[in-house]
Image (cartoon, rainbow, N blue to C red):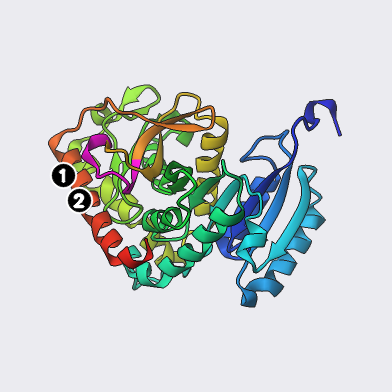
Amino acid sequence: MRPMDKETNAPIRVAITGAAGNIGYALLWRIASGDCFGKNQPIILQLLEIPPGMQRLDGVIMELRDSAFPLVHDIIGTDNPEVAFNDANAIFLVGSRPRTKDMDRSDLVAANGPIFVGQGKAIEAVASSNVKVITVGNPCNTNALIASANAPNIPNRQFTAMTRLDQNRAVGQLAERAGVPASKVEDVFIWGNHSNTMYPDPRFAKVDGESVVELFDNEWLQGAFLDTVATRGKEIIVARGASSAASAASAAVDHMRDWWQGSDGRIVSMALPSEGWYGVPKGLVFSFPCRCENGEMIVVEDLSIDEFAQQKIDENVNALLEERDAVSELL
């Protein structure tokens, strides 16, 4: 091992559910290579699957061992959540029923909600008290709410949902239209629910230092841009016959990396339980503009809200309240 690559930290335990699925498979190699927790942070992977998926998980574990990642100190495969979440420092709740082309995210509430009851209880029972949880399985905002409600002794702000995929999609659209790399786009973020109601807010975004609202006309920003980001998931299902996998895994890495290591002053999208910010009801898992520092998410609270943005925020609040009401018996 080269001196510059020398490990300096004790291993952390990283749990991933649905680890043999398409998103889990794409996610594991990014985490194992150090893209998420850092190039000097060794990890122990604790991988959860349902019993019918255990043979496939065995194959995934073989491949991980064959990749000989220096940072991976151990790999545990199991169908028991309490084994997977034992002493976990970070948890990716990926496993859930996937969406098909005829389904919207709200259709998944009844199918996936009960999964997150059991996982929340297992996290409460055995995970590290300072665990960071990202919920990827849809409908992820409400699933994060369910998991948190079933882990009452863990602070609810340690349970988050992923809207970074929506943000990354928005970044991709702005970069493509401007003809620049995605790295030139900053401070576009998502309000609300990870669903077709989410609002990619371009008002504070910049492309290569120039204001997006000055570069592009409002008709495109409130029309085709918004619609493309909102419906991208269904477009991908139609095009490739399966839901987003690699892009979802990449977004999950981005989310956890920024939460764990900091966002370097950038505004990023994080769905977390509201404390009343921007009039969003307390406890509702809602995507806000955040900066991440020292392992904490800090909601950016001083942004102006115009009439259109308020309309979109209200639309998302109403959608999430409906989802919450539909799973009230699980909370």
Q: Nearer the viewer, residue 166 or 236?
A: 166
Q: Mark 2 points at which residue?
A: 315
Residue at image position (42%, 54%) is 144
Within the image, what quadrant is residue 179 found in? top left
Q: For the residue labelled by badge 2, is the local secondary structure a helix, a strand or a loop? A: helix
Mark 1 Cα shell of 10 Å, populated few (<14), some (14-19), many (≥20): few
Within the image, what quadrant is residue 305 found in? top left
Residue at image position (24%, 36%) is 278
Left of 43 or right of it: where is 331?
A: left
Location of residue 185 with respect to 172 vertically, above or below: above
Q: Nearer the viewer, residue 163 or 277?
A: 277
Rendered location of residue 282, percent (x, y): 28, 44
Res. 196 visible in picture: yes
Instruction: Write down the region rendered in magenta.
Output: 277-287
Location of residue 144 with respect to 173 vertically, above or below: below
Left of 317 or right of it: where is 32?
A: right
Within the image, what quadrant is residue 145 found in? bottom left
Q: Do the residues labelled 2 and 1 touch (CB within 8 Å)?
A: yes
Q: Name the residue under label 1.
A: 311
Q: For the residue labelled by badge 1, is the local secondary structure a helix, a strand or a loop? A: helix
In the image, residue 191 lies in the stretch drawn in magenta: no
Left of 40 or right of it: where is 53?
A: left
Rendered location of residue 236, percent (x, y): 42, 61
Question: Which label was assigned to residue 218?
Answer: none
Residue at image position (36%, 44%) is 273
Residue most toward the left? 307
The amino acid on which the numbered mark 2 sits, given as a three-letter code, is Glu
